[in-house]
Amino acid sequence: MKKKVAFITGISGMVGSHLAEYLIKNTNFNIVGMIRKRSTLKNLANLTKNINEGNRVKLVYADLKDSISINKAIKETKPNYVYHLAAQSDPKTSFHIPLETNEVNVKGTIRLLEACKEFASKSLIHICSSSEVYGRVKKNFLPIKENCPFHPASPYAISKVGTDLVGRHYSEAYNMNIMITRMFTHTGPRRSDFFAESSFAKQIAMIENNLIKPIVYHGNLKSLRTIADVRDAVRAYYLLLTKKPRKGEVYNIGGTYSCKVGDILNYLISISRKKGIKKKFDKNRSRPLDADLQIPSTKKFYNQTKWKPEYKFETTMNDLMNYWRKEIKKNPDEYINR
């Protein structure tokens, strides 16, 4: 019997690489990962053998801004499952490149779904939206359910509203098997240092190696976040498309541990090998507007899949810290002036 094929956009990112590893370990799927010509592949180190041998993992070059390359990738692959994870994913950066963010996230999703409609119309498709679509949530809407009104607080969040609605439209208009997730904060090893908790861990690792002064620079520490581990997130994404998938449905997915961003920084400092680390506000690390109450209700997704987070907050943060310790030890010069 021919093996099923899972197509992952953004396979070289934190989530995409963890998802590919999960599928390799827990399924017999073949995997096709979409990368751009300038993608860095360091997150795929654990998949190198599978990639080089070409038996389970294949990489294809395509770009969400280029319909021809996406059409070619989907036509040649004809995937059974599509995990659309690729995006311009940093809310803060989106304030500087709002048009690029819209081009990649909204129009890129349209290009992908057009290709799937033409060449893989029966595929099960996961569109990765974001909890950021809820944005400035009023307290009476907590915990946030899927019917909470949108109030996006960044160009990134606006683009994810568009992505969300595009997914719903293609499901309804063309009878495509599309499911949408609004994932709340998820982190762990390989998290980009564009994001607060990973930036904190990277700075602390640099301090431990005497590369910078014992000061961690930060932005807004008052925002409330609910933290999940990336390894729990990819398990949820697998269940989404394999556990009685329901066409056109939207699901919140998130952890159970809620805290302020400042609490995350305090915890990371507490597990550092260096004592006396100080904190300093840097206005350049703050967004003009922030989504400051991110507490999800994941009851709908649990009722369908029985998914629950397995990783504790402390484990996630320790693993993130150790990831950066290894990165800084391997390539100190890469991060000194970054």
Image (cartoon, helix red, strand yellow):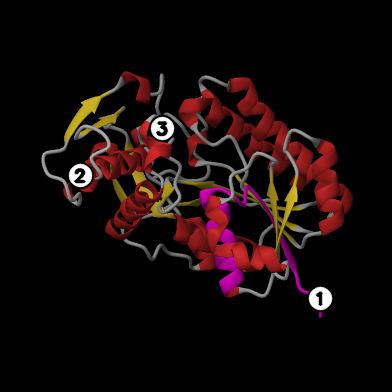
Check disc 2 and give the amino acid type. Answer: Ile
- Front-most of 124 and 94? 94
Towards the viewer: 175 or 204: 204
> Residue 137, which numbered label?
3
Give the secondary structure at mark 1.
Answer: loop
- Say which mark, if any, is on residue 2: 1
Q: Residue at x 74, y 33 (%)?
A: 65
> Looking at the picture, which amino acid does disc 3 mark?
Val
Q: Is residue 171 magenta?
A: no
Q: CA distance from mark 3 to mark 1?
A: 47 Å
Residue in the picture at 12% in, 44% down = 275
As helix, strand or loop, the secondary structure at mark 3 comes to: loop
* Disc 2 target residue: 269
In the displayed structure, 111 sits above or below 25; it is above
Q: CA distance from mark 2 to mark 3?
A: 30 Å
Q: Is residue 271 left or right of residue 126?
A: left
> In the image, which residues are magenta?
1-25
216 w.r.t. 326: above or below = above
Q: Residue at position x 43%, y 38% from top?
A: 334
Tag 1 and tag 2, C-beta contact below 8 Å = no
Please report whichever mark, 2 or 3, sits nearer to the chain's N-terminal start. 3
Looking at the rendered structure, the secondary structure element under dot 2 is helix
Q: Residue furthest front?
A: 333
